[in-house]
Amino acid sequence: MHTQYDTELSKICEKYSAPILRDFVWWVLIEAKRRNIRKLYFLARDGYVMREVALVLCEKFNLDIECRYLYTSRAALRMPTYHLIGEEAYDLLLGYSYQVTPNSMLQRALLSDTVKAKILREVGITEEQKDELLTRIETFELSDKIRRNALYRESVCEMSRKAYPITIEYFMQEKLFEDSTVAIVDSGWNGSMQRSLRQLMDAEHYQGEIIGFYFGLFQEPPQMPNSTYLHWYFGPSGRLSDKVRFSNNLFECICAAPHGTTLGYQYSQNGIVPVFGDTVSEKQNEFVRRQIELVTNFASEQIADKKFKDFKLARAERMSRQLIRQLMYRPKPEIVAAFQQMQFCDDIYESYYSALANEAQTGQLKNYTLFAQFKRALKKTAVKTQDLAWPYGVVALLPAPKRLWYRWNILAWEILKNSPARRIYSQLKKHK
Protein backbone atom coordinates (compact mmCIF):
# COMPACT_ATOMS: atom_id res chain seq x y z
CA MET A 1 0.00 0.00 0.00
CA HIS A 2 1.04 3.63 0.03
CA THR A 3 2.54 3.79 3.53
CA GLN A 4 3.00 1.49 6.51
CA TYR A 5 0.52 3.65 8.44
CA ASP A 6 -2.11 3.70 5.69
CA THR A 7 -4.76 1.82 7.67
CA GLU A 8 -4.52 4.21 10.61
CA LEU A 9 -4.29 7.23 8.30
CA SER A 10 -7.46 6.08 6.56
CA LYS A 11 -9.25 5.90 9.93
CA ILE A 12 -8.02 9.38 10.88
CA CYS A 13 -9.13 10.90 7.58
CA GLU A 14 -12.55 9.25 7.72
CA LYS A 15 -13.31 10.06 11.36
CA TYR A 16 -11.51 13.40 11.81
CA SER A 17 -9.84 15.17 8.89
CA ALA A 18 -12.59 14.79 6.29
CA PRO A 19 -15.55 15.90 8.46
CA ILE A 20 -13.56 18.76 10.01
CA LEU A 21 -12.49 20.15 6.63
CA ARG A 22 -15.83 19.34 5.01
CA ASP A 23 -17.80 21.43 7.50
CA PHE A 24 -15.33 24.31 7.31
CA VAL A 25 -15.51 24.41 3.52
CA TRP A 26 -19.28 23.98 3.59
CA TRP A 27 -19.50 27.05 5.85
CA VAL A 28 -17.23 28.99 3.47
CA LEU A 29 -19.46 28.16 0.51
CA ILE A 30 -22.62 29.13 2.40
CA GLU A 31 -21.06 32.48 3.36
CA ALA A 32 -19.80 33.04 -0.18
CA LYS A 33 -23.23 32.33 -1.64
CA ARG A 34 -24.89 34.62 0.91
CA ARG A 35 -22.48 37.42 -0.01
CA ASN A 36 -22.89 36.80 -3.75
CA ILE A 37 -19.22 35.82 -4.11
CA ARG A 38 -18.63 33.69 -7.18
CA LYS A 39 -14.87 33.27 -7.02
CA LEU A 40 -12.79 31.93 -4.14
CA TYR A 41 -9.00 31.91 -3.98
CA PHE A 42 -7.66 29.06 -1.86
CA LEU A 43 -4.18 30.04 -0.66
CA ALA A 44 -1.25 27.66 -0.91
CA ARG A 45 -0.44 25.45 0.76
CA ASP A 46 -3.10 24.83 3.41
CA GLY A 47 -5.75 25.70 0.84
CA TYR A 48 -4.84 22.81 -1.47
CA VAL A 49 -6.93 20.09 0.19
CA MET A 50 -9.57 22.69 1.15
CA ARG A 51 -10.02 23.46 -2.55
CA GLU A 52 -10.23 19.75 -3.39
CA VAL A 53 -13.06 19.40 -0.87
CA ALA A 54 -14.70 22.59 -2.19
CA LEU A 55 -14.70 21.21 -5.73
CA VAL A 56 -16.48 18.09 -4.47
CA LEU A 57 -19.12 20.16 -2.67
CA CYS A 58 -19.62 22.56 -5.58
CA GLU A 59 -20.17 19.68 -7.99
CA LYS A 60 -22.50 17.84 -5.61
CA PHE A 61 -24.61 20.91 -4.81
CA ASN A 62 -24.34 22.46 -8.29
CA LEU A 63 -22.87 25.72 -7.00
CA ASP A 64 -21.81 28.46 -9.40
CA ILE A 65 -18.63 29.30 -7.48
CA GLU A 66 -15.21 29.24 -9.11
CA CYS A 67 -12.56 27.73 -6.83
CA ARG A 68 -9.07 28.87 -7.78
CA TYR A 69 -5.74 27.97 -6.21
CA LEU A 70 -3.32 30.82 -5.58
CA TYR A 71 0.33 29.79 -5.36
CA THR A 72 1.63 31.96 -2.57
CA SER A 73 3.09 31.92 0.94
CA ARG A 74 4.11 34.30 3.69
CA ALA A 75 7.52 34.49 2.05
CA ALA A 76 6.21 35.16 -1.47
CA LEU A 77 3.77 37.83 -0.27
CA ARG A 78 6.03 39.56 2.22
CA MET A 79 9.16 39.95 0.12
CA PRO A 80 7.64 42.42 -2.39
CA THR A 81 6.10 44.45 0.46
CA TYR A 82 9.24 45.09 2.52
CA HIS A 83 10.25 48.26 0.67
CA LEU A 84 6.70 49.61 1.11
CA ILE A 85 5.98 49.09 4.81
CA GLY A 86 8.86 50.64 6.74
CA GLU A 87 9.74 49.22 10.16
CA GLU A 88 7.00 46.60 9.91
CA ALA A 89 9.26 44.78 7.46
CA TYR A 90 11.90 44.20 10.12
CA ASP A 91 9.31 43.15 12.68
CA LEU A 92 8.32 40.38 10.26
CA LEU A 93 11.83 39.43 9.21
CA LEU A 94 13.48 39.35 12.61
CA GLY A 95 10.90 37.68 14.84
CA TYR A 96 11.27 34.54 16.91
CA SER A 97 10.38 31.07 15.64
CA TYR A 98 10.80 27.52 16.93
CA GLN A 99 14.41 27.27 15.76
CA VAL A 100 16.48 30.39 15.06
CA THR A 101 20.15 30.79 14.24
CA PRO A 102 21.94 33.99 13.13
CA ASN A 103 22.27 32.53 9.64
CA SER A 104 18.61 31.48 9.34
CA MET A 105 17.50 34.92 10.52
CA LEU A 106 19.28 36.54 7.58
CA GLN A 107 18.15 33.82 5.18
CA ARG A 108 14.57 35.08 5.56
CA ALA A 109 15.52 38.02 3.34
CA LEU A 110 17.12 35.70 0.74
CA LEU A 111 20.44 37.49 1.03
CA SER A 112 23.53 36.13 -0.73
CA ASP A 113 26.15 34.26 1.28
CA THR A 114 28.58 37.13 0.76
CA VAL A 115 26.16 39.75 2.08
CA LYS A 116 25.11 37.53 4.99
CA ALA A 117 28.73 36.95 5.99
CA LYS A 118 29.49 40.68 5.97
CA ILE A 119 26.39 41.55 8.03
CA LEU A 120 27.18 38.85 10.58
CA ARG A 121 30.73 40.18 10.98
CA GLU A 122 29.39 43.71 11.43
CA VAL A 123 27.00 42.63 14.21
CA GLY A 124 29.68 40.60 16.00
CA ILE A 125 28.79 37.03 15.00
CA THR A 126 31.72 34.76 14.25
CA GLU A 127 31.84 31.96 11.69
CA GLU A 128 31.56 29.44 14.53
CA GLN A 129 28.47 31.15 15.97
CA LYS A 130 26.42 31.64 12.79
CA ASP A 131 24.59 28.29 13.00
CA GLU A 132 24.17 28.13 16.78
CA LEU A 133 20.61 27.85 18.09
CA LEU A 134 19.48 31.06 19.78
CA THR A 135 17.32 31.42 22.87
CA ARG A 136 14.38 33.79 22.74
CA ILE A 137 16.28 36.60 24.48
CA GLU A 138 19.33 36.08 22.26
CA THR A 139 17.05 36.28 19.23
CA PHE A 140 15.63 39.63 20.36
CA GLU A 141 19.10 41.02 21.12
CA LEU A 142 20.52 39.98 17.75
CA SER A 143 17.39 41.25 15.98
CA ASP A 144 17.99 44.74 17.37
CA LYS A 145 21.56 44.74 16.06
CA ILE A 146 20.59 43.49 12.61
CA ARG A 147 17.68 45.93 12.38
CA ARG A 148 20.11 48.83 12.80
CA ASN A 149 22.62 47.50 10.26
CA ALA A 150 22.70 49.74 7.17
CA LEU A 151 23.80 46.99 4.77
CA TYR A 152 20.98 44.74 5.93
CA ARG A 153 18.34 47.41 5.44
CA GLU A 154 19.65 48.36 2.00
CA SER A 155 19.83 44.70 0.92
CA VAL A 156 16.29 43.93 2.09
CA CYS A 157 14.84 46.89 0.18
CA GLU A 158 16.80 45.92 -2.94
CA MET A 159 15.49 42.33 -2.85
CA SER A 160 11.97 43.60 -2.22
CA ARG A 161 11.95 45.99 -5.17
CA LYS A 162 13.12 43.19 -7.46
CA ALA A 163 10.32 40.88 -6.30
CA TYR A 164 7.51 43.44 -6.62
CA PRO A 165 6.87 43.67 -10.41
CA ILE A 166 6.56 39.95 -11.16
CA THR A 167 4.37 39.41 -8.09
CA ILE A 168 1.91 42.03 -9.33
CA GLU A 169 2.00 40.46 -12.80
CA TYR A 170 1.15 37.09 -11.25
CA PHE A 171 -1.83 38.67 -9.46
CA MET A 172 -3.00 40.13 -12.77
CA GLN A 173 -2.58 36.78 -14.48
CA GLU A 174 -4.74 35.19 -11.79
CA LYS A 175 -7.38 37.93 -12.21
CA LEU A 176 -7.20 39.34 -8.69
CA PHE A 177 -7.82 42.89 -9.88
CA GLU A 178 -10.86 42.09 -12.02
CA ASP A 179 -13.60 41.99 -9.36
CA SER A 180 -14.77 44.42 -6.71
CA THR A 181 -14.25 41.73 -4.07
CA VAL A 182 -11.35 39.31 -3.63
CA ALA A 183 -12.28 36.36 -1.39
CA ILE A 184 -9.49 34.19 -0.01
CA VAL A 185 -9.64 30.95 1.98
CA ASP A 186 -6.87 29.81 4.32
CA SER A 187 -6.18 28.23 7.70
CA GLY A 188 -5.65 31.62 9.34
CA TRP A 189 -4.03 32.13 12.80
CA ASN A 190 -3.16 35.85 12.50
CA GLY A 191 -4.30 36.99 9.04
CA SER A 192 -0.83 38.17 7.99
CA MET A 193 -1.11 36.91 4.41
CA GLN A 194 -4.27 38.92 3.85
CA ARG A 195 -2.51 41.98 5.22
CA SER A 196 0.41 41.52 2.81
CA LEU A 197 -1.99 40.96 -0.08
CA ARG A 198 -3.86 44.14 0.86
CA GLN A 199 -0.61 46.14 1.00
CA LEU A 200 0.43 44.94 -2.46
CA MET A 201 -2.96 45.55 -4.04
CA ASP A 202 -3.22 48.96 -2.38
CA ALA A 203 0.11 49.86 -3.97
CA GLU A 204 -1.57 49.20 -7.33
CA HIS A 205 -4.55 51.39 -6.28
CA TYR A 206 -7.02 48.53 -5.92
CA GLN A 207 -10.13 49.93 -4.21
CA GLY A 208 -12.14 46.74 -3.77
CA GLU A 209 -12.71 44.66 -0.66
CA ILE A 210 -10.63 41.66 0.43
CA ILE A 211 -12.55 39.09 2.47
CA GLY A 212 -10.72 36.28 4.25
CA PHE A 213 -12.43 33.03 5.26
CA TYR A 214 -10.34 31.37 7.96
CA PHE A 215 -10.55 28.19 9.96
CA GLY A 216 -9.40 30.11 13.03
CA LEU A 217 -7.85 33.38 14.19
CA PHE A 218 -5.80 33.47 17.38
CA GLN A 219 -5.49 37.25 17.44
CA GLU A 220 -7.17 40.32 16.01
CA PRO A 221 -5.56 41.19 12.66
CA PRO A 222 -4.41 44.81 12.31
CA GLN A 223 -7.25 46.83 10.88
CA MET A 224 -6.94 47.88 7.24
CA PRO A 225 -9.44 49.64 4.94
CA ASN A 226 -11.77 47.38 2.94
CA SER A 227 -10.58 44.24 4.70
CA THR A 228 -12.85 41.68 6.36
CA TYR A 229 -11.71 38.68 8.39
CA LEU A 230 -14.21 35.87 8.98
CA HIS A 231 -13.48 32.80 11.11
CA TRP A 232 -15.06 29.40 11.49
CA TYR A 233 -13.83 27.47 14.56
CA PHE A 234 -12.45 30.21 16.80
CA GLY A 235 -11.73 33.93 16.68
CA PRO A 236 -9.70 36.46 18.68
CA SER A 237 -12.42 36.84 21.31
CA GLY A 238 -13.88 33.36 20.96
CA ARG A 239 -13.97 30.41 23.34
CA LEU A 240 -10.67 30.12 25.19
CA SER A 241 -11.29 26.41 25.72
CA ASP A 242 -11.19 25.86 21.95
CA LYS A 243 -7.92 27.71 21.38
CA VAL A 244 -5.92 26.04 24.15
CA ARG A 245 -6.83 22.53 22.96
CA PHE A 246 -6.10 23.24 19.30
CA SER A 247 -2.85 22.49 17.45
CA ASN A 248 -2.34 24.73 14.44
CA ASN A 249 0.82 22.79 13.58
CA LEU A 250 -1.07 19.50 13.35
CA PHE A 251 -3.79 21.22 11.35
CA GLU A 252 -1.19 22.43 8.83
CA CYS A 253 0.12 18.87 8.49
CA ILE A 254 -3.44 17.67 7.84
CA CYS A 255 -3.65 20.37 5.15
CA ALA A 256 -0.24 19.63 3.64
CA ALA A 257 0.09 20.08 -0.14
CA PRO A 258 2.00 17.94 -2.66
CA HIS A 259 4.45 20.73 -3.53
CA GLY A 260 7.06 22.85 -1.78
CA THR A 261 6.52 26.30 -0.36
CA THR A 262 6.22 29.13 -2.88
CA LEU A 263 9.42 31.19 -2.71
CA GLY A 264 8.54 33.60 -5.49
CA TYR A 265 7.68 33.65 -9.18
CA GLN A 266 9.38 33.29 -12.55
CA TYR A 267 8.51 33.66 -16.22
CA SER A 268 7.88 30.58 -18.35
CA GLN A 269 6.36 29.70 -21.71
CA ASN A 270 3.05 29.18 -19.88
CA GLY A 271 3.08 32.55 -18.17
CA ILE A 272 4.21 33.29 -14.64
CA VAL A 273 4.71 30.21 -12.50
CA PRO A 274 5.72 29.70 -8.87
CA VAL A 275 9.25 28.93 -7.73
CA PHE A 276 9.04 26.14 -5.17
CA GLY A 277 11.26 25.31 -2.25
CA ASP A 278 12.35 21.72 -1.77
CA THR A 279 9.92 19.22 -0.27
CA VAL A 280 11.02 17.19 2.74
CA SER A 281 11.23 13.75 1.14
CA GLU A 282 9.48 11.53 -1.37
CA LYS A 283 8.20 9.44 1.53
CA GLN A 284 6.45 12.46 3.01
CA ASN A 285 5.15 13.48 -0.43
CA GLU A 286 3.62 10.03 -0.78
CA PHE A 287 1.99 10.38 2.64
CA VAL A 288 0.60 13.81 1.71
CA ARG A 289 -0.82 12.68 -1.63
CA ARG A 290 -2.49 9.71 0.04
CA GLN A 291 -3.91 11.94 2.78
CA ILE A 292 -5.43 14.32 0.21
CA GLU A 293 -6.94 11.40 -1.69
CA LEU A 294 -8.49 9.95 1.46
CA VAL A 295 -9.87 13.27 2.73
CA THR A 296 -11.42 14.08 -0.64
CA ASN A 297 -12.96 10.62 -1.09
CA PHE A 298 -14.39 10.48 2.42
CA ALA A 299 -15.78 14.02 2.17
CA SER A 300 -17.53 13.00 -1.04
CA GLU A 301 -19.00 9.88 0.60
CA GLN A 302 -20.16 11.84 3.64
CA ILE A 303 -22.28 14.24 1.58
CA ALA A 304 -23.67 11.64 -0.82
CA ASP A 305 -27.20 11.87 0.62
CA LYS A 306 -27.04 15.53 1.68
CA LYS A 307 -28.46 18.74 0.32
CA PHE A 308 -26.78 22.13 0.52
CA LYS A 309 -29.40 23.38 2.97
CA ASP A 310 -28.74 20.45 5.34
CA PHE A 311 -25.79 22.29 6.88
CA LYS A 312 -26.64 23.31 10.45
CA LEU A 313 -24.16 25.74 11.96
CA ALA A 314 -24.61 24.85 15.64
CA ARG A 315 -24.45 21.13 14.98
CA ALA A 316 -21.37 21.48 12.77
CA GLU A 317 -19.57 23.60 15.37
CA ARG A 318 -20.41 21.13 18.13
CA MET A 319 -19.21 18.16 16.08
CA SER A 320 -16.00 19.93 15.01
CA ARG A 321 -15.23 20.79 18.64
CA GLN A 322 -15.65 17.17 19.71
CA LEU A 323 -13.51 15.81 16.86
CA ILE A 324 -10.75 18.40 17.21
CA ARG A 325 -10.34 17.77 20.92
CA GLN A 326 -10.13 14.02 20.36
CA LEU A 327 -7.60 14.44 17.56
CA MET A 328 -5.43 17.29 18.82
CA TYR A 329 -5.77 17.48 22.61
CA ARG A 330 -6.27 13.87 23.66
CA PRO A 331 -4.96 11.84 20.70
CA LYS A 332 -4.48 8.12 20.97
CA PRO A 333 -0.88 6.88 20.54
CA GLU A 334 -1.75 5.28 17.21
CA ILE A 335 -2.89 8.66 15.86
CA VAL A 336 0.44 10.22 16.81
CA ALA A 337 2.26 7.23 15.28
CA ALA A 338 0.51 7.82 11.97
CA PHE A 339 1.95 11.35 11.83
CA GLN A 340 5.43 10.52 13.12
CA GLN A 341 6.98 10.71 9.67
CA MET A 342 5.66 14.23 9.12
CA GLN A 343 8.34 16.91 9.30
CA PHE A 344 7.20 20.37 10.35
CA CYS A 345 8.66 23.87 10.01
CA ASP A 346 7.34 27.30 11.02
CA ASP A 347 10.10 29.28 9.28
CA ILE A 348 8.81 31.09 6.20
CA TYR A 349 11.68 29.77 4.04
CA GLU A 350 11.71 26.36 5.72
CA SER A 351 15.39 26.56 6.66
CA TYR A 352 14.96 23.58 8.98
CA TYR A 353 12.57 20.71 9.67
CA SER A 354 11.70 18.81 12.81
CA ALA A 355 9.38 15.96 13.64
CA LEU A 356 5.79 16.88 14.44
CA ALA A 357 5.77 14.47 17.41
CA ASN A 358 7.69 11.30 18.26
CA GLU A 359 9.03 9.33 21.20
CA ALA A 360 12.46 10.96 20.96
CA GLN A 361 10.85 14.25 22.04
CA THR A 362 9.37 12.95 25.31
CA GLY A 363 12.46 14.07 27.22
CA GLN A 364 11.71 17.68 26.30
CA LEU A 365 8.42 17.59 28.17
CA LYS A 366 10.26 18.48 31.36
CA ASN A 367 10.42 22.00 29.91
CA TYR A 368 6.60 22.10 29.71
CA THR A 369 5.65 21.91 33.39
CA LEU A 370 4.20 25.10 34.86
CA PHE A 371 7.28 25.49 37.05
CA ALA A 372 9.66 25.16 34.09
CA GLN A 373 7.58 27.57 31.98
CA PHE A 374 7.55 30.22 34.70
CA LYS A 375 11.26 29.72 35.24
CA ARG A 376 11.97 30.20 31.54
CA ALA A 377 9.75 33.28 31.43
CA LEU A 378 11.29 34.97 34.44
CA LYS A 379 14.95 34.20 33.77
CA LYS A 380 17.02 35.92 31.11
CA THR A 381 18.82 32.68 30.35
CA ALA A 382 17.04 29.76 28.75
CA VAL A 383 17.78 26.23 27.68
CA LYS A 384 18.74 26.12 24.03
CA THR A 385 16.14 23.64 22.91
CA GLN A 386 13.65 23.65 20.09
CA ASP A 387 10.01 24.09 21.09
CA LEU A 388 7.77 21.10 20.48
CA ALA A 389 5.50 21.42 17.46
CA TRP A 390 2.70 19.33 18.99
CA PRO A 391 3.16 18.98 22.76
CA TYR A 392 -0.16 17.17 23.28
CA GLY A 393 0.93 14.64 20.65
CA VAL A 394 4.21 13.95 22.46
CA VAL A 395 2.31 13.59 25.75
CA ALA A 396 0.16 10.87 24.18
CA LEU A 397 3.25 8.67 23.87
CA LEU A 398 3.80 8.60 27.65
CA PRO A 399 2.39 6.09 30.19
CA ALA A 400 -1.09 7.01 31.46
CA PRO A 401 -0.20 8.74 34.78
CA LYS A 402 2.43 10.92 33.12
CA ARG A 403 0.03 11.76 30.29
CA LEU A 404 -2.43 13.27 32.75
CA TRP A 405 0.27 15.27 34.53
CA TYR A 406 1.92 16.79 31.48
CA ARG A 407 -1.33 17.40 29.62
CA TRP A 408 -2.64 19.35 32.63
CA ASN A 409 0.57 21.42 32.84
CA ILE A 410 0.54 22.25 29.13
CA LEU A 411 -3.16 23.14 29.21
CA ALA A 412 -2.71 25.38 32.27
CA TRP A 413 0.13 27.28 30.60
CA GLU A 414 -1.84 27.71 27.38
CA ILE A 415 -4.76 29.09 29.39
CA LEU A 416 -2.40 31.57 31.05
CA LYS A 417 -0.97 32.69 27.71
CA ASN A 418 -4.34 33.14 26.04
CA SER A 419 -6.44 34.43 28.92
CA PRO A 420 -6.83 38.08 29.97
CA ALA A 421 -3.67 37.45 32.00
CA ARG A 422 -1.74 37.32 28.71
CA ARG A 423 -0.71 40.93 29.29
CA ILE A 424 1.23 39.73 32.31
CA TYR A 425 2.68 36.87 30.28
CA SER A 426 3.74 39.27 27.54
CA GLN A 427 5.56 41.38 30.10
CA LEU A 428 7.31 38.28 31.39
CA LYS A 429 8.44 37.35 27.89
CA LYS A 430 10.09 40.72 27.43
CA HIS A 431 12.40 39.85 30.29
CA LYS A 432 13.12 36.36 29.07
Image: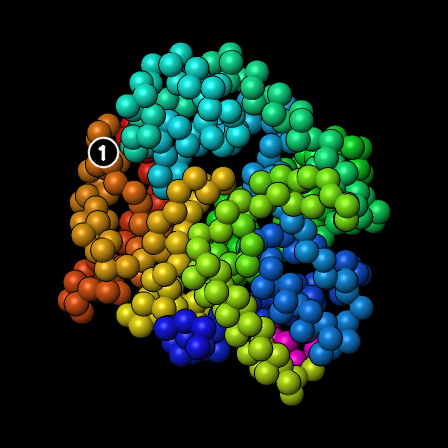
Q: Quadrant of residue 265?
A: top right
Mark 1 belongs to which amino acid? Answer: Ala
* In the image: residue 15, left or right of residue 201: left
Is residue 309 highlighted in magenta?
A: yes
**Residue at x 37%, y 27% (from the top left corner):** 102
Which residue is tagged 1?
382
Q: Secondary structure at mark 1?
A: loop
* Residue positioned 73% across, 31% down in the render: 165
- 276, above or below 329, in the image: above
Q: Where residue 218 appears, x then y in whole percent?
A: 48, 49
The x, y position of residue 335, in whole percent, is 35, 70
Residue 183 is one of the magenta-drawn residues = no
Asked whether residue 42 appears in the rendered view, the answer is yes
Q: Is residue 73 above or below residue 14?
A: above
Q: Which residues are magenta?
A: 308-315
Residue 184, given in percent of the width and then of the height, sits at 67, 52
Residue 101 appears left or right of 196: left
Q: Residues within 10 Å of mark 1 (few under 14, many from 20)?
A: some
